[in-house]
Image (cartoon, rainbow, N blue to C red):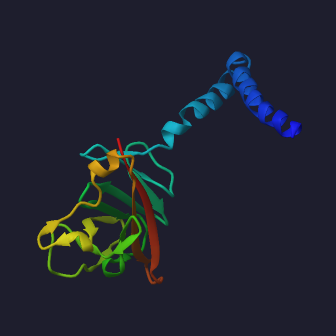
Amino acid sequence: MALITYILIAIPVCLLAIILWLCFDYWKYKRKNHFILLILLFYPILSYAQHTDKAQCKISFSSYANQPGKLEYTQDGIIYRFTPESNAWEITIKNNTNKDIRINWEKASFIINGKASGVGFCPVTADSPPTDVIKEKSEITRTVTASNLIKGKKVNKIYSKRNLKRGGRTSVNIVLPIGIGNQPQFFHIFNFVVTAN
C-alpha cells in the first residue's frame, strides 16, 4: 500500500521536474526544448474543435486529426471538406487521383446520435439522390441532411444550440460509399462531435 502511495506522489513530482528542467535549461538546448515546451503547451488547443458554425456551435472530427479552422480529411488522393450548419452540411469532395470516383448517395447514411437515416439533398427535391461521378482532377459540392429530418419542403435541425447549452453533445456520423476507378465501393465513415461554444 505504501509503495502505491509513493508511486502516485513520484509521477507528478517527476513531471514537474521535467517541466522545470525544460524551462531553466532553455539556453543550453534552446531550440529543442523550446519546441517540446510549445508542443506541451499548445497540444490541447491543436486537438480542440476546429470549426465554428453561424450559431456558434463547435464541430470537430472525433476520429481524425483536426486542422485549424476547417474540417478536412485526405485519403487515397481524395479530399473531403465539410462545412456544417444546424440543418444541413455542405460536403465538398475533390478528386486528386488519375481515376474517376463514384459516390452512391442512395447508400449513404447520415447518423445523428445513433439514429440512422438516408441522405437528402438541400434544397429539397422529390428525386432520389443520384450517383455522382467525379472526373479526375475535379470536385463536386453537395448540401446534404438526414432524410428523416425532411418534412415536406421544410428541413428540421440536426442539432440545436439550446440543447447543447445544457452541457449536451451531438454525435454526427456521415457514411459515404465511394468507388475509385473499377474498384468496388468502400464505405468511408466520418465521425463528428458538436458542442456549444
Residue 87 is drawn in which quadrant? bottom left
Q: Quadrant of the C terminus?
A: top left
Above/below status of 91 relative to 29: below
Q: Is residue 175 above or below residue 64?
A: below
| Left or right of residue 153, residue 63 in this image | right
Quadrant where the image shows the N terminus = top right
Q: Looking at the rendering, which quadrant does residue 121 occupy? A: bottom left
Q: Is residue 138 above or below residue 177?
A: above
The image position of residue 66, as x and y in percent, is 47, 49
Q: How many marks can you see?
A: 0
Above-or-below relation of 89 to 181? above
Question: Residue 43, located in which quarter of the rendered image?
Answer: top right
Residue 13, position as x, y percentages in the image:
76, 27
Relative depth, front residue between 146 and 105 = 146
Q: Residue at x 44, y 57 (%)?
A: 73
Image spot of residue 188 (x, y percent): 45, 70
